[in-house]
């Protein structure tokens, strides 16, 4: 996939589209001749290298949500830890949220840095079998803002997919920014060349969140990314004092359950709010192994991990 | 660069609501600030530049409306109240169904935002621009185009967690680099009061926004607790500031708006800051 240059005309169809160089927007563009010659649509040299790298990764799971702040990064990190609780399972996390990387803090490695070597990037290891890569490790300070437009972000994501030396992985979980734009298109494009790729969609119960999640589901349908299911986060809150369960974010339209009926996608989990989770994410500690093993949140996350395992082993069985 | 004559014409002063983090309440804040300004008698507009996840139309219960076009080819904002004092423009009005996704890469988003900033026929005292999370195409496009408009500055929204404060710190760096005045920080979702026993739980930690304001020498505009009634209003499109005018949360928003207006007045007395921005070149990508 070639990238659309920054100075492209307003309705540039994209150098690799069938209308490249021929669309009305192309008139007067300095690249018109190049595009219409078809040279720009030539196969992407990096695609082969990325496919090679992905070939040693068994399953790829993309954590998506149209909405921000619904818990994509928390779900990503918890799920990775839950999957990696089996010592022989190798798990990697790739944080493709370029402007707001959260994984370094959530996993407690915010101070680490990765230097690009000639051969590639070595990810940061949280456990022997749990590694993570994020732009956060490439920035000099926590305050650095990544003020990049789309093409620069795509370039980095491509390098992440091509150059991070994960070794052999059972699961690679990708944490994405909110929206349906550059990052998502780039990730979907490259991952879908490999096999065993699927997504989960995270939402909170409110219609304002479901609204954006519907768009994300439309996105997945358009790029043909299979969705395992919906994860409803922040469903309810149990008061630590009186144990009364209350709804913090009331839904006017029935939450994930009604979205599930509407789109025919199963609800995989309904995760309660637990102030200890927010704290663990700020401190980078491992909530799943330190919290009360019978707490509703721990049980819900373990069940979610089990469903992900089942999905991929079933799809693997079907494929072979 | 856009022609300064056409950018945000018909707008008195502009406030940009920003946050590096998603889901911290940018849109909810934008809507409550607009309701509050309107209550004070001002004509207010909201421009939703979140192209992939527009929330404002739902929060104002105008989801099904369409934007009309004047004979001059300008877009007419959708009015969200009978008195026609609160108007809104969002990409959601241009989509066929609420399922439609805007799957666009940067350049296309940039041109849409430029159009939203230049082609709307506003008639408002204050315009609030609601942005998507991040520091990327949408934000750069807004900043490039509004430098010649009368911009009071940015309101940064965060939740109390460090996870959110990290991203807002990055947004602050963005504001500094693009020379956008920062009006202050709002700490949203600070504490939740159990409806059964009135115990206040700090679901998402506490104090991160205020600490950031202190560290960066910025005005701390206020702390808004989690209020299910407010969530309910943003779901149904009700005017929280009228329906629950006596609630503590309503008075927090009133005090925030007073601080904003005071700092805007100071700024207007401060002379010609905006004209000097107009001549700077902006080359910040990479």
Image (cartoon, rainbow, N blue to C red):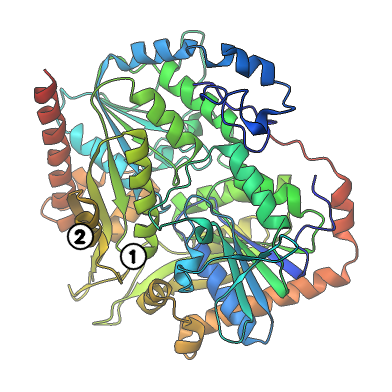
Residue A239 place in picture, x, y as percent: 23, 71
Residue A201 place in picture, x, y as percent: 30, 46
Q: Is residue A167 left or right of residue B176?
A: left
Q: Is residue A234 left or right of residue A33?
A: left
Protein chain holding label 2: A
Contact, CB < 8 Å: mark 2 with mark 1? no
Element on which disc 2 rests: helix
Asked if residue B247 can be seen in this view, the reply is yes
- Residue A207 sits in which quadrant? bottom left
Please determine if labels 2 and 1 lie on a single subunit: yes
> Which residue is drawn at the image coordinates 73% and 56% (left, top)?
B118
Q: Alpha-carbon distance for marks 2 and 1?
A: 11 Å
Protein chain holding label 1: A
- Badge 2 crowding class, 10 Å Cα cut-off, few under 14, some 14 to 19, many 20 or more, is some
Q: Nearer the viewer, residue B171 or B202?
A: B171
Residue A77 place in picture, x, y as percent: 31, 40
- Residue B182 sits in which quadrant? bottom right
Asked if residue A139 can be seen in this view, the reply is no
- Ranked by sequence position, the earlier of labels 2 and 1 is 1
Q: What residue is shown with label 1? A: A206
Q: Nearer the viewer, residue A177 or A271?
A: A177
Q: Nearer the viewer, residue B280 or A185?
A: A185
- Compared to residue B215, the image places residue B35 above or below, namely below
- Compared to residue B37, the image places residue B51 above or below, namely above
> Which residue is drawn at the image coordinates 50% and 69% (left, top)?
B65
Q: Residue furthest bottom?
A: B246
Where the N terminus of chain B falls, by quadrant?
top right
- Compared to residue A98, the image places residue B201 above or below, namely below
Q: What residue is shown with label 2? A: A257
Residue A1 place in picture, x, y as percent: 49, 21
Q: Is residue A169 left or right of residue A121?
A: left
């Amino acid at each position: 996939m070639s990238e659309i240059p920054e100075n492209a005309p307003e309705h540039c169809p994209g150098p690799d589209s069938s209308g490249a160089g021929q669309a009305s927007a192309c008139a007067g563009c300095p690249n018109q001749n190049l595009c219409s010659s078809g040279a720009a649509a030539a196969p992407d040299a990096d695609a082969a290298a990325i496919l090679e790298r992905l070939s040693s990764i068994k399953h790829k799971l993309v954590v998506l949500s149209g909405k921000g702040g619904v818990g994509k990064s928390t779900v990503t990190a918890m799920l990775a830890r839950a999957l990696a609780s089996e010592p022989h399972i190798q798990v990697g996390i790739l944080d493709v949220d370029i402007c707001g990387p959260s994984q370094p803090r959530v996993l407690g490695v915010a101070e680490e840095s990765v230097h690009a070597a000639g051969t590639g990037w070595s990810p940061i290891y949280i456990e022997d079998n749990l590694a993570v890569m994020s732009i956060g490790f490439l920035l000099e300070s926590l305050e650095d803002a990544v003020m990049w437009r789309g093409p620069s972000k795509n370039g980095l994501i491509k390098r992440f997919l091509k150059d991070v030396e994960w070794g052999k992985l059972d699961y690679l979980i990708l944490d994405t920014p909110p929206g349906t734009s550059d990052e998502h298109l780039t990730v979907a494009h490259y991952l879908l060349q490999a096999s065993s790729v699927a997504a989960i969609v995270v939402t909170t119960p409110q219609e304002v969140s479901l609204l954006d999640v519907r768009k994300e589901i439309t996105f997945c349908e358009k790029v043909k990314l299979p969705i395992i299911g919906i994860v409803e986060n922040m469903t309810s809150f149990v008061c630590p004092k009186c144990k009364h369960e209350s709804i913090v974010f009331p839904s006017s339209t029935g939450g994930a359950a009604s979205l599930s009926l509407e789109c025919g996608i199963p609800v995989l989990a309904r995760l309660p709010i637990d102030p200890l989770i927010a704290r663990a994410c700020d401190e980078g500690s491992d909530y799943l192994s330190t919290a009360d093993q019978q707490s509703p949140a721990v049980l819900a996350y373990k069940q979610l991990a089990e469903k992900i395992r089942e999905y991929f082993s079933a799809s693997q069985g079907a494929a072979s | 660069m856009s022609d300064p004559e056409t950018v945000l014409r018909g707008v008195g002063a502009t406030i940009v609501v920003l946050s590096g983090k998603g889901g911290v309440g940018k849109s909810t804040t934008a809507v409550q600030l607009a309701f509050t300004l309107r209550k004070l008698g001002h004509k207010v507009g909201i421009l939703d530049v979140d192209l992939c996840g527009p929330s404002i139309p739902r929060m104002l219960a105008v989801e099904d409306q369409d934007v009309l076009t004047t004979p001059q080819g300008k877009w007419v904002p959708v009015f969200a109240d009978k008195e026609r004092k609160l108007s809104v423009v969002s990409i959601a009005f241009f989509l066929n169904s609420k399922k439609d996704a805007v799957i666009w890469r940067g350049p296309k988003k940039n041109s849409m935002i430029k159009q939203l900033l230049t082609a709307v026929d506003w008639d408002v005292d204050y315009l609030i621009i609601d942005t998507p999370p991040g520091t990327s195409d949408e934000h750069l496009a807004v900043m490039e185009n509004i430098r010649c408009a009368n911009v009071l500055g940015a309101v940064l929204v965060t939740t109390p967690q460090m996870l959110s404060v990290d991203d807002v710190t990055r947004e602050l760096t963005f504001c500094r680099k693009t020379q956008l005045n920062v009006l202050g920080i709002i700490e949203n979702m600070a504490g939740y009061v159990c409806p059964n026993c009135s115990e206040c739980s700090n679901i998402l930690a506490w104090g991160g926004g205020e600490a950031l304001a202190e560290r960066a020498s910025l005005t701390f505009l206020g702390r808004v607790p989690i209020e299910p009634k407010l969530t309910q209003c943003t779901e149904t499109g009700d005017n929280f500031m009228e329906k629950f005018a006596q609630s503590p949360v309503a008075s927090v928003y009133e005090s925030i708006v007073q601080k904003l207006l005071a700092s805007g007045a100071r700024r207007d007395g401060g002379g010609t800051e905006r004209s000097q921005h107009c001549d700077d070149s902006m080359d910040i990508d990479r």
